[in-house]
Image (cartoon, rainbow, N blue to C red):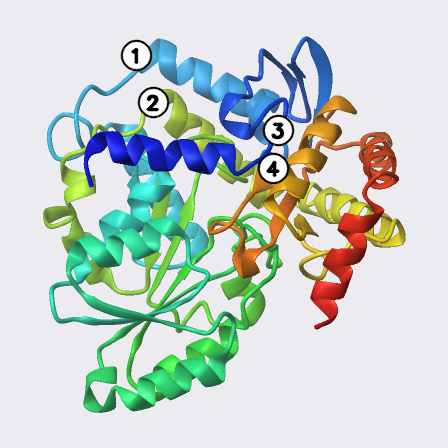
Amino acid sequence: MSISDRFAELAQIRESLGTVEADPSRIVMEKILSPTEAIIGNRPTILVGTNNYLGLTFDSGVLEAASAAMHEQGSGTTGSRMANGSFAGHAALERAFAEFYGVPSAMIFSTGYQTNLGLLMAILRPGDKVVLDSHSHACIYDGCRISGADFLAFRHNDPEDLRKRLRRMGGEAEGALVIAEGLYSMLGDTAPLAELCAVAKEYGAWFMVDEAHSFGVYGERGLGLCESAGILDQVDFITGTFSKSLASLGGFCVSRHPEMQLLRYGSRPYIFTASSSPANIAAAHAALDAIRTRPELKDKLWANANRLHDGLRALGYELASTVSPVIAVRVPSKEGGARLWNELLEQGVYANLVLPPAAPDSAALLRCSLSAAHSFAQIDAILAAFETVGAGAGADRAACAEAGAR
């Protein structure tokens, strides 16, 4: 295939959306007004697709910390952690994560994507065995591919299928790596982490959990699904991102194994990428402090999630999972999803349009992510918009409900 053929293939993807006024690749947020509002197309729009779970992007403490760091240390590091890019703030944030989790080791990376890429490229080699959840994020798949490891997927959220695949590996299961996520970002469902961890340990495998969308959201202290499941002392690696609840840019990895610090000498994304800017690090550190000291943020997020979830169900929409901070509405076709997404935008509501293959099970998704910063009035306005666009989408909803029943 030539490069021109590849462009033609991408054009077909665009054309497959049908005749719509806009698609997500062409949307520009002209002005951000708050964690939950922006100007899009010269129109005030409620944002319900930002992953800004705790609403901290405009928090005064976060903004002040970021501003002070930038003025004191400059706008960027201009170097990797292994060159000139390890500032005092980076080391302090790593200590804060290790202390919060009660583990000896923590590392921070420049993005959440690079966190999983950097960890997997450092610990895996050709011939190593990996078994990952079939709905794992692209960066997990990419890290396994680049490492050269042999990897296969187990059925989503199915401990028995994981057990079957490990059993088939025989002696090679011992020392293999099992990977799952906490909260899955597309459907909004959560993993049975305690059961998956038990299976992994039964066969002598290592266990890694990506808490990108669940850190700050689940657990008594906000440590994520591993805390809720009571397995913090059993998981080998936990990764997460700054770009969700931590209102910044970057990522972290913590481990109960002190040897993880050795990965600084072998993780190419860590060694060869410029480190996070002082402002990003300071913002993430301030947001981490907010998670530790302001549990009311998590409580408000869950109140909003319950309100939207219950309201959408009452309107007759088929939802992809039980209540969580990610609420995905199933639409049976790409064209129908694109049309409804455009109509929501016309109503002043921005959600995420998710199409196959990113959307599992061949259905399109209208994905909503809730924030602690949403008011109940905004939730009700979002529901009113869904009611308006749904009035003309009875066939789409009926078809989706029928598909879900099969």
Residue type (three-letter) at the residue carrying disc 3: Thr
Q: Secondary structure at mark 1?
A: loop
Amino acid carrying mark 1 in the image? Gly
Q: Are marks 3 and 4 in contact (CB under 8 Å)?
A: no
The residues tagged by marks 4 and 1 sit, at their Cα atoms, a distance apart of 34 Å
Q: Earlier in the sequence, mark 3 or mark 1?
A: 3
Q: Which residue is mark 4?
A: 352
Amino acid type assigned to the residue bearing label 4 in the image: Asn
Q: Is residue 102 above or below residue 84?
A: below
Give the CA distance from mark 2 to mark 1: 7 Å
The residues bearing labels 3 and 1 have C-alpha atoms spaced at a distance of 46 Å
Q: Please tell me whether mark 4 or mark 1 is closer to you in this view.
A: 4
Q: Quadrant of the N terminus?
A: top left
Q: CA distance from mark 2 to mark 3?
A: 44 Å
Any mark on residue 74, and which? 1
In this view, the mark in front (2 or 3): 3
Give left or right: position of 399 versus 264: right
Q: Residues within 10 Å of mark 3 (few under 14, many from 20)?
A: few
Coordinates of residue 143 in the picture (x, y in percent): 25, 53
Q: Secondary structure at mark 4?
A: strand
Q: Is residue 254 left or right of residue 307?
A: left
For marks 4 and 1 on the same chain, the one whose residue lies earlier in the sequence:
1
Who's the residue at 58% across and 17% down the image?
29
Q: Which residue is mark 2?
A: 278
- Tell whether label 1 touches label 2 (CB within 8 Å): yes
Q: Which residue is mark 3?
A: 19
Distance (Cα) linking label 3 and label 4 = 18 Å
Question: 394 or 56: nearer the eye?
Answer: 394
Q: Split into 4 quadrants, where in the image is the C terminus? A: bottom right
Picture quadrant of residue 220: bottom right
